């Protein structure tokens, strides 16, 4: 398998995270992640997100964060409805 770039790594990420038994793919991921910090961050964040979802607990979002998310969603929604 040729060296994969970040875009190819991200496209195959689900197989890797799911523990696919495709040995060449896993080796390519390991090689790429060994030197690509942005992809390391993506993989680690995805793993953490999966773990948080699996534990079934709810987490309180800080008010400032919740307000920012709501503001951004409103802005996106308003921009979308105005363009149609």
Image (cartoon, helix red, strand yellow):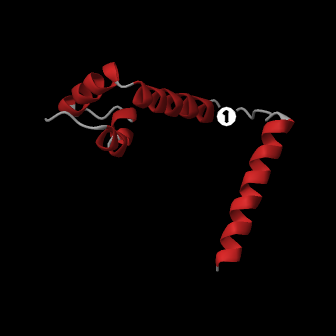
Please give the residue where the numbered disc 1 appears in the rendered image. Answer: 56
Front-most of residues 42 and 46: 42
Farthest top residue in view: 34
- Which quadrant, please, contains the C terminus? bottom right
Residue 27 in picture, x, y percent from top left = 22, 25
Residue for point 76% across, 60% down: 74
Quadrant in which the N terminus appears: top left
Residue farthest along the right direction in this orientation: 63
Task: State which quadrant residue 49 falls in.
Answer: top right
The residue lying at 86 percent from left, 37 percent from top is 63
Q: Residue at x 74, y 67 (%)?
A: 78
Q: Nearer the viewer, residue 48 or 40?
A: 40
- Secondary structure of the residue carrying numbered label 1: loop
Q: Give the image location of residue 25, x and y in percent.
A: 23, 33
Q: Quadrant of residue 61?
A: top right
From this view, report whether residue 31 is shown above or below residue 74: above
Q: Is residue 50 left or right of residue 27?
A: right
| x, y percent for residue 24 | 18, 31
């Amino acid at each position: 398998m040729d060296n994969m770039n970040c875009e190819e790594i991200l496209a195959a990420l689900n197989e890797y995270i799911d523990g696919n038994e495709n040995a060449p793919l896993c080796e390519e991921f390991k090689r790429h992640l060994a030197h690509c910090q942005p992809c390391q961050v993506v993989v680690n964040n995805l793993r953490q997100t999966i773990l948080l979802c699996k534990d079934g607990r709810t987490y309180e979002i800080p008010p400032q964060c919740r307000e920012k998310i709501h503001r951004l969603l409103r802005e996106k929604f308003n921009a979308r409805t105005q363009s149609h």
